[in-house]
Image (cartoon, rainbow, N blue to C red):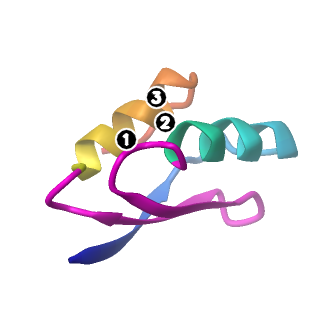
Amino acid sequence: MATTDTISVPEIHCGHCKASIEGALQPMDGVTSAEVDVQSTNVTVTYDESVVTRDALVSAIEEQGYEVPR
């Protein structure tokens, strides 16, 4: 079952941030879509919870060098 989650990433401020985060999330197994909104600094991800967890998504964002508030 697909879940859509919004993850706040306050450090997002440019197109490079968008490309970096989307590039890390989109190829992950279970991720249907990942879209970064630079203006709101939010990442909206649709994914299958039986395949990938929210924690794994957050880790992928953090591996790109961004801090995700918990």
The label on residue 34 is none
Task: Quarter of the image for the C terminus: give it.
Answer: top left
Q: Secondary structure at mark 3?
A: helix
Determine the CA span between mark 2 and mark 1: 5 Å
Vertical placement of residue 8 versus 2, above or below: above
Vertical placement of residue 63 versus 26, above or below: above
- Is residue 46 part of the magenta span, yes or no? yes
Identity of the residue drawn at 65% across and 57% down: 41
Determine the CA span between mark 3 and mark 1: 6 Å
The label on residue 58 is 1
Cβ atoms at labels 2 and 3 below 8 Å apart: yes
Residue 28 x, y percent position in the rendering = 42, 43
Looking at the image, which is closer to me, 51 or 17? 51
Vertical placement of residue 41 versus 14, above or below: below
- The quadrant holding residue 60 is top left
Cβ atoms at labels 3 and 1 below 8 Å apart: yes
Task: Quarter of the image for the N terminus: give it.
Answer: bottom left
Residue at the spot of label 3: 62
Q: Which residues are magenta?
A: 26-51
- The quadrant holding residue 68 is top left
Q: Amino acid at mark 2?
A: Ile
Determine the CA span between mark 2 and mark 3: 4 Å
Residue 18 x, y percent position in the rendering = 73, 47
* Residue reaching furthest to the right: 15
* Residue reaching furthest to the left: 50
Identity of the residue drawn at 55% across and 30% down: 66
Identity of the residue drawn at 37% across and 44% down: 57
Q: Secondary structure at mark 2?
A: helix
Residue 21 x, y percent position in the rendering = 61, 41
Residue at the spot of label 2: 61
- The quadrant holding residue 15 is top right
